[in-house]
């Protein structure tokens, strides 16, 4: 099991790639959280078979997300995808990024029930697929890419989500330079198909 959120520091020169996490949180539905019980995406409430929506449409079912022994119910709405350029990755100074680019995926999470949750990992089970059907790869770096959009706010461990509140989170994914993101997905665990949103 891997943790896919990045640790942000002030922008540093000579950024170094820390890890490329394989797959897209591979339907694990869980994460490790320091000082509390493992975070998880619940596996209740929807029949087998994925629903497919379009960006801007909320999930039809509430998704439970737990952190620090608190469980909230959320409606998730992928909002947009901002694709970068291959040269954005040159500052990482690593040849394994050749022929790839970054796609920044934004997801709104509205707390609609359950307990207030501190630092829910909204993006942990979010993934992306290219228009050719290949999975995008979550990108984790020490520091921050200078090309990161100013409105791209990543998951953090401090923000508290209370009922009725809505917050947008964002994370970077790697795709081939010549591809586009065709879908944003949300893993619901091993036993249910992921939710999927088409990218126009």
Image (cartoon, rainbow, N blue to C red):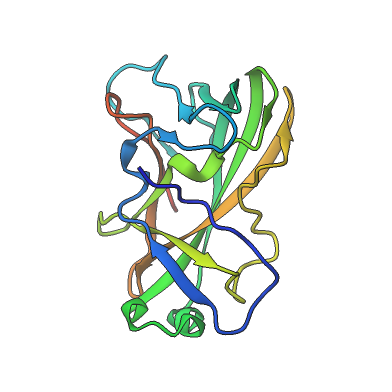
Q: Quadrant of the N terminus?
A: top left
Q: Position of residue 37 (x, y in %)?
A: 52, 26
From this view, report whether residue 112 is shown above or below residue 180: above
From this view, report whether residue 150 is shown above or below residue 122: below
From this view, report whether residue 67 is shown above or below residue 79: above
Query: Which residue shows up at 47% across the image and 62% down it?
Result: 140
From this view, report whether residue 59 is shown above or below residue 13: above
Q: Position of residue 92 (x, y in %)?
A: 47, 80
Would you say residue 119 is visible in this rendering? Answer: yes
In front here: 106 or 51?
106
In front here: 23 or 36?
36
Tell me which corner region of the image, top left, top right, bottom left or bottom right, holds residue 131.
Answer: bottom left
Tell me which corner region of the image, top left, top right, bottom left or bottom right, holds residue 47.
Answer: top left
Q: Position of residue 141 (x, y in %)?
A: 50, 66
In front here: 134 or 35?
35
Query: Which residue shows up at 36% across the image and 77% down it?
Result: 97
Apparent side of residue 155 relative to residue 195 in the rendered image (left or right):
right
């Amino acid at each position: 099991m891997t943790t896919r959120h990045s640790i942000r520091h002030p922008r540093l020169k000579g950024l170094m790639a820390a890890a490329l996490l394989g797959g897209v949180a591979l339907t694990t539905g869980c994460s490790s959280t320091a000082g509390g019980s493992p975070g998880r995406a619940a596996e209740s409430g929807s029949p087998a078979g994925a629903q497919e929506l379009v960006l801007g449409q909320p999930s039809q079912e509430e998704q439970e997300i737990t952190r620090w022994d608190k469980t909230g119910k959320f409606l998730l709405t992928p909002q947009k995808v901002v694709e970068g350029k291959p040269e954005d990755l040159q500052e990482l100074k690593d040849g394994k990024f050749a022929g790839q680019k970054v796609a920044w995926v934004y997801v709104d999470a509205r707390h609609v029930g359950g307990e207030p949750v501190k630092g829910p990992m909204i993006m942990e089970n979010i993934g992306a697929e290219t228009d050719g059907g290949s999975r995008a790869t979550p990108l984790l770096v020490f520091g921050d890419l200078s090309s990161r959009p100013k409105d791209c706010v990543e998951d953090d461990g401090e923000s508290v989500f209370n009922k009725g509140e809505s917050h947008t989170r964002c994370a970077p994914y790697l795709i081939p330079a010549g591809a586009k993101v065709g879908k944003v997905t949300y893993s619901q665990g091993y036993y249910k198909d992921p939710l999927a949103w088409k990218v126009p």
